[in-house]
Image: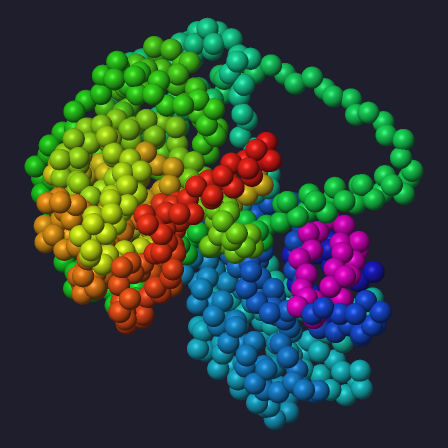
């Protein structure tokens, strides 16, 4: 009854001590029908005997009016006494509801401090990007009538150390009334990281309120301009181009794009982003207007009992609720945002870091003062580039696909040519071309599905952006190929990963014929593409003879990159990518080869490792998969040390656990170390999908049986 009164007063309700069990979470939504109720219970992390009837206690919840639910992201932090949400608005706002431990039972002051420490960690985590308000039953008072207790002092110190403010409109007023009718105190508070609260009031004892606490209410002003996380964002419409009249589509575009035909409008546009957005919207809406309307399907009536109908209805509801669970999206966004943010390790070379950043500033000044223009794009070249892309790819964040350009006709080609040349001329990449959709893709291979590390992020980038990337890459491909190490076999014209595998086999045969031992080091870079250091990449680009506006444009691509994670058709909030190259971007494979090229050049120039005849082949590489091969154990350790030095300078990590050494033709004891940690020396290991062992003649005796087994599985699955 009292909850029904509160829901009419507030858009958000924070509850402490709801006393519900985990199995009873849905009860709140039965009372608050217009609210999305996010609940934590005391037994969330317990497995109870269903026959045991334990008394409920504690518990917290945040209930949000459904008109705001599309802005809400449930945060993964906190024990069962803490629940937090983030409002993804113009200035993100984190709301934390807490029920602090009180005295009695087995609870001590240390338990109280533990929860405060958890809150401090959350403040440190979210304060750089969001405002924070914490509200709840603090079980401590700043204005206790009698002598202060230890919890009061600890709570006061917590507020000061974290810079938390009591709103200026908060009055000294009791909010807790003990059932003995003698004791009362003010222990319920809202605190904030900056002055946001406009009104702060307490509802004095109301007869409908059977609790020992009086509710307190605050009001704040916030600007809601956009929804970064939303289950209301519709799925991008996948246009069936075989159902569209392509000639009519081309004719309509010719009519609707007439304003862009004036060269002066395009070439004098100060805001390229706005004009590109308008251009894209016209193309997308024109295509959608020609989509045949879907025929209304009439559902076949099922002859089910009422009980069966209710079971199915409930099942569909819970599936919908799981599918649209904001916490899943929030967890993905947080995981990938953390991956896209540079980390600092003690072993990273800080002097080299400063040197590189200084070089980037100097190069930028030089290239801005002495411009070397990029070769302009012709309409023929653009058309050829567009036709080279495959059809049927997923639409980008603006629902745009390459087919929109392929079937747009000469008018689209003319205008887009002018826009691309304007981007090349100004070396300014519009931000709407930098927005990507990150899709977590499960790696398989027996990895646990609940572990985010078992997923690879593939990014769907702008269709127009891909076209510009490909044209830009074509102007620099020859320079890069001329400087690229011949040890690199990945993503290279005229080369193949199979060649790298063949080199390893031939080196083993060569060693066997010469009766030499051979040592194969298989190293594994952690999240190689995701943690590429941008400044280091820009410097390596210059070393590959990329200069002038070509260099400036490449750098511009990697400024303010933004990604939204897509999960079950919904999008997370956007976050910035401050490191890494996108898996799915046109430039990305080449960019990574450039990033790793200096390491391969060191091996190639110093010729450390194994040979086939007189040809040096000591480090056959496929993109990030670097294999170190030597006939001397000390040479292999030197090669490992060189790779670790490169990793420390260029701020990436080699996994000591996943890296190993195959020792062939040598029964003596040898050990190899990486960061002072001894590497494994297994009997077999997988390299480029080929299982290699140390005992068979060519080291690949299990390849054929494995391939047969894979074929059987494939036949069975299909």
Observer-nearest of 397 and 529: 529
Q: Residue at x 14, y 58 (%)?
A: 355
**In this orientation, does residue 215 appear?**
no
Which residue is more in the foreground, 102 or 521? 521
Measured from the top left, where is residue 39 in percent x and y? Answer: 68, 61
Residue at the spot x=79%, y=25% of the render?
299
For this rendering, which residue is in front, 322 or 665? 665
Up-down relation of residue 262 to residue 681 (above or below): above
Where, by quadrant of the figure, is residue 487 drawn?
top left
Which segment did they paint magenta? 19-45
On the rendered structure, is 662 left or right of 141? Answer: left
Residue 461, quarter of picture: top left
On the image, the x and y values in percent for residue 593 come to: 24, 43
Location of residue 554 in the rendering, given as x and y in whole percent from the top left corner: 23, 38
Q: Say above or below: 215 vs 301.
A: below
Query: In the picture, which quadrant includes the N terminus?
Result: bottom right
Number of callouts = 0
441 sits left or right of 375 in the view:
right
Q: Please tell me whether residue 556 is drawn above or below residue 189 in the rendered image.
A: above
What's the residue at 80%, 74% (across, down)?
Answer: 54
Farthest-out residue, right: 305
Side (left or right) of 581 relative to 511: right
Where's residue 667, x and y in %?
29, 66
- Queried whether the magenta region covers residue 602, the answer comes back as no
264 or 363: nearer the viewer = 363
Q: Is residue 138 visible?
A: yes
User: Compared with residue 358, is residue 371 higher up or lower down, i.e. above or below?
Assistant: above
In which quadrant of the rendered image does the C terminus lie?
top right
Can you tell which quarter of the image residue 542 is in?
top left
Q: What colouring does the structure picture have?
A: rainbow
Residue at 20% of width from left, 31% of height from top? 477
């Amino acid at each position: 009854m009292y909850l029904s009164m509160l829901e009419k007063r507030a858009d958000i309700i924070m509850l402490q001590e709801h006393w519900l069990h985990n199995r009873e979470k849905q009860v709140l939504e039965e009372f608050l029908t217009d609210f999305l109720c996010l609940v934590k219970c005391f037994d969330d992390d317990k497995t109870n005997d269903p026959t045991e009837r334990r008394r409920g206690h504690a518990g917290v919840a945040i209930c949000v009016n459904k008109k705001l639910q599309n802005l809400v992201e449930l945060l993964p932090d906190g024990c069962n006494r803490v629940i937090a949400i983030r409002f993804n608005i113009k200035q993100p706002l984190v709301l934390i509801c807490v029920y602090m431990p009180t005295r009695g039972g087995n609870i001590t002051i240390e338990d109280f401090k533990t929860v405060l420490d958890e809150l401090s960690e959350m403040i440190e985590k979210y304060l750089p990007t969001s405002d924070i308000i914490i509200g709840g039953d603090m079980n401590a008072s700043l204005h206790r009538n009698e002598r202060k207790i230890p919890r009061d002092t600890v709570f006061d110190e917590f507020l000061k150390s974290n810079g938390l403010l009591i709103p200026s409109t908060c009055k000294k007023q009791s909010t807790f009334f003990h059932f003995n009718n003698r004791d009362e105190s003010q222990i319920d508070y809202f605190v904030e990281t900056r002055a946001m609260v406009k009104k702060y009031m307490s509802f004095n004892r109301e007869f409908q309120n059977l609790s020992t606490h009086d509710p307190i209410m605050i009001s704040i002003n916030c600007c809601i301009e956009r929804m970064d996380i939303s289950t209301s964002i519709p799925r991008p419409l996948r246009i069936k181009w075989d159902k569209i009249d392509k000639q009519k589509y081309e004719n309509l575009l010719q009519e609707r794009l007439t304003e862009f035909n004036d060269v002066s409008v395009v070439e004098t546009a100060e805001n390229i982003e706005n004009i590109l957005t308008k251009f894209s919207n016209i193309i997308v809406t024109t295509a959608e207007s020609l989509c045949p309307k879907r025929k209304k399907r009439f559902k076949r009536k099922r002859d089910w009992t009422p009980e069966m109908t209710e079971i199915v209805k409930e099942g569909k509801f819970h599936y919908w609720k799981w599918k649209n669970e904001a916490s899943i999206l929030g967890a993905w966004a947080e995981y990938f945002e953390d991956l896209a943010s540079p980390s600092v390790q003690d072993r990273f070379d800080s002097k080299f870091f400063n040197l590189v950043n200084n070089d980037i500033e100097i190069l930028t000044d030089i290239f801005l003062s002495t411009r070397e223009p990029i070769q302009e794009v012709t309409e023929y070249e653009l058309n050829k580039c567009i036709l080279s892309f495959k059809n049927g790819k997923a639409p980008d964040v603006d629902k745009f696909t390459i087919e929109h350009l392929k079937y747009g006709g000469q008018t689209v080609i003319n205008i887009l040519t002018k826009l691309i040349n304007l981007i090349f001329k100004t070396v300014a990449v519009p931000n709407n071309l930098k927005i990507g959709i990150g899709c977590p893709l499960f790696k398989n291979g027996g990895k646990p599905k609940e572990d985010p590390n078992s997923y690879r992020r593939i990014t769907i980038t702008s269709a127009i952006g891909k076209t510009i990337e490909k044209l830009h890459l074509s102007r620099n491909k020859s320079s890069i190929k001329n400087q690229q190490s011949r040890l690199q076999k990945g993503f290279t014209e005229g080369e193949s990963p199979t060649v790298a595998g063949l080199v390893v086999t031939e080196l083993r045969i060569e060693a066997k014929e010469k009766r030499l031992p051979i040592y194969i080091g298989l190293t594994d870079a952690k999240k190689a593409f995701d943690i590429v250091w941008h400044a280091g990449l820009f410097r390596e680009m210059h070393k590959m003879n990329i200069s002038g506006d070509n260099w400036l444009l490449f750098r511009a691509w990697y400024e303010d990159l933004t990604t939204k994670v897509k999960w079950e058709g919904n999008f997370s909030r956007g976050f910035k990518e401050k490191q890494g190259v996108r898996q799915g971007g046109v430039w990305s494979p080449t960019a990574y080869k450039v990033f790793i090229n200096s390491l391969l050049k060191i091996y190639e120039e110093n010729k450390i490792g194994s040979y086939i005849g007189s040809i040096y082949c000591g480090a056959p590489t496929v993109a990030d998969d670097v294999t170190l091969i030597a006939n001397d154990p000390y040479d292999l350790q030197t090669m490992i040390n060189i790779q670790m030095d490169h990793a420390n300078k260029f701020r990436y990590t080699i996994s000591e656990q996943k890296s190993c050494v195959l020792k062939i033709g040598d029964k003596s004891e040898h050990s190899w170390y990486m960061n002072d940690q001894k590497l494994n020396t297994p009997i077999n290991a997988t390299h480029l999908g080929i299982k290699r062992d140390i005992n068979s003649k060519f080291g690949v005796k299990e390849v054929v049986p494995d391939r047969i087994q894979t074929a059987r599985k494939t036949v069975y699955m299909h």
